[in-house]
Amino acid sequence: MKKVSFVIPCYRSEHTLPAVVAEIDEKMKTMPQYQYDIFLVNDCSPDDTLGVIRNLCQGREYVKGIDFARNFGQHSALMAGLRYSDGDYVVCLDDDGQTPADEVDRLLDKLEEGYDAVYARYDHKQHSAFRNLGSKLNERMTRMMLGKPPELYISSYFAVKRFVVEDMVRYENSYPYVIGLVLRATGKIVNVPVNHREREIGSSGYTFKKLVALWFNGFTAFSVKPLRIATAIGGTSAGIGFLYGIYTILKRLVKPDVPMGFSSTMSAIVFFGGMIMLMLGLIGEYIGRIYISLNNSPQYVIREKMNLDQEC
């Protein structure tokens, strides 16, 4: 009998989490061919999410709780759940009820067919316009920087096989990016259509600042393409500057009475100065991440574990 581990990052979900767990229980009753357990990772939520997790763990050995000492982000919470999971299949979903747990059979069926990873695809997303825009930008970033196939839709509701999880948890540095880890492990990935529900309670925890930080983390953690793009831009700018210099000299020789343009000179200085600062900042970001990794900055710190005895 195969086992399915559900991993749910939790943040401000005291009112929605019990319904998500209940929905998983009801669905898995109709799928007796699988054993299952549930990992609830509290990302230092400011509400009573931790208390709800404690209550859900009482009397249910298959429900496991993990409490972070501070807020580390959704991807770190996913990594913690992945490390403690032991299922043949691991399913990751949201804590707000928008990702339908009662359609998990669609994802598992694709894994049974031989795919290594399955992502839910939503025909009609019920997120806000801001969140949908963020998803589109993230999709473009993963396609350009991480080599994601253009036809592959990435979402927070996905399932992977055990060997993919084992490869993902080998990544122990700070700033994990789950999508990049999945793409690094396998190319045998497929989408399945599922419904996306409206949020009944609360709002998304992703602010504009957090979304920008997530995108920046994605392409600096798993790709050197930004550095190559910076090199190409620098080479192009240098070439343009060289040609403009030749043009200026020839213009001076042909028309010595024409005064040199102060505005054009300042524009060139500001443009090239800005490009240099941008590229130095990008290089500094990479160096800073190397420095943080060398200092063994943790992905997460666990304050409390519930129904978990093994070390990880």
Image (spheres, grey):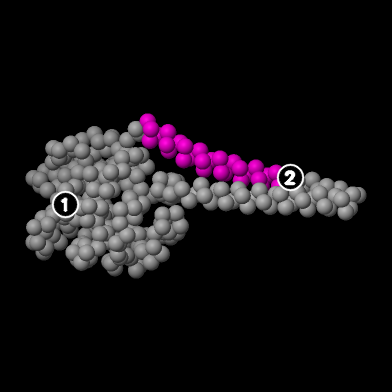
**Residue shown at the point (25%, 63%) measured from the top left:** 115
**Residue 247 image point, x, y percent:** 78, 53
What label sits on residue 266 in the rendered view? 2
**Residue 271 image point, x, y percent:** 66, 47
Q: Quadrant of the C terminus?
A: top left
**Residue shown at the point (16%, 52%) measured from the top left:** 87
Secondary structure, magenta segment, majority class? helix
Q: Amino acid at mark 1?
A: Gly
Q: Which residue is mark 1?
A: 87
Q: Secondary structure at mark 1?
A: loop
- Is residue 147 in view from this perspective? yes
Q: Are marks 2 and 1 in contact (CB under 8 Å)?
A: no
**Residue shown at the point (8%, 58%) measured from the top left:** 1
Compared with 247, 47 (above or below) is above
Which residues, given as a range, are shown in magenta? 268-295
Q: Secondary structure at mark 2?
A: helix
Local crowd at mark 1 within 10 Å, few (<14), some, or many (≥20)? Answer: many
- Is residue 20 in view from this perspective? no
Q: Is residue 257 left or right of residue 56?
A: right
Residue nearer the viewer, 22 or 69 = 69
Q: Is residue 16 left or right of residue 126?
A: left
Q: Give the Cα distance between marks 2 and 1.
A: 62 Å
Which of the marked residues, 2 or 1, is nearer the chain's N terminus? Answer: 1
Compared with 45, 96 (above or below) is below
**Residue 42 image point, x, y percent:** 25, 43
Q: Is residue 87 magenta?
A: no
